[in-house]
Amino acid sequence: MPNQGPGSIESRYAWTMTDNSGSAGDSRSGAENDSGNGTPASNDGNSSNARPERRGPPPNPLYHPLFLPVLLIAFTLWFGWDGFLTTDPKMLEHQNFNRIMFYIMLPLSLFLVPRGIKDFREEQAAAEKKQVEGNSG
């Protein structure tokens, strides 16, 4: 059984709003069911007519598993270009800094990029599995 703790892949994007009170402009109460007939849905969770929980705000793009790897690759390429390949006289003043940063960013990239890709693939597989289970049930 997969880990479903607060840091797990399944819970990372599964933000839901548990407050079912209607918004200020909403004519329906949050306790009504989805059929729209005005009858309240039971809160025991056993009712087949119960309205599913609404999803919360979209996830922050900074939490995407490929955000850091893409950023690291970009900085590694930038520092590598400015440290070893540029011929701009103004950039040659900062050549040592760019070389040092390239040597720092390269091992970080080599370690974190495959890890980010693995996390991304795991999230895609978990989402696909959840969708298949949702469609079959």
Image (cartoon, grey):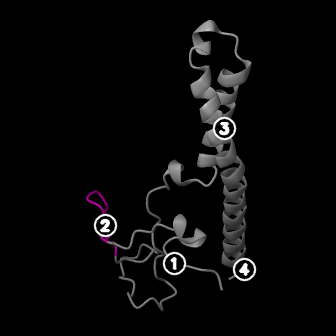
- Find out whether the residues at labels 1 and 3 contact each other: C-beta distance under 8 Å: no
State the CA–CA distance, disc 4 to disc 3: 50 Å
Q: Distance between the residues labelled 4 and 1?
A: 25 Å
Q: Does residue 123 lie above or below 74 as drawn?
A: below
Name the N-terminal-most of marks 4 and 1.
Answer: 1
Please name the residue that numbered disc 3 is placed on.
Answer: 103
Provide the secondary structure element on which disc 4 rests: helix
Q: How crowded is mark 3: few (under 14 residues within 10 Å), some or many (20 or more)?
A: few
**Which residue has dot 4 on it?**
136
Q: Which residue is drawn at 39% across and 88% down?
A: 42
Q: Mark 2 points at which residue?
A: 22
Q: Which of 15 and 5 is in front in this view?
A: 5
Assign the magenta stretch its main secondary structure: loop
Task: Please tell me which of labels 4 and 3 falls first in the chain.
Answer: 3
Q: Please tell me which of labels 2 and 4 falls first in the chain.
A: 2
Number of the front mark, 3 or 2: 3
Q: Residue 20 carries which label?
A: none
Magenta residues (range) = 21-30
Q: Where is residue 93 in the image (x, y as percent from the top left)?
A: 57, 14
Numbered disc in front, either 4 or 1: 1
- What residue is pinned by disc 1? 5
Three-letter code for the amino acid on which mark 2 is drawn: Gly
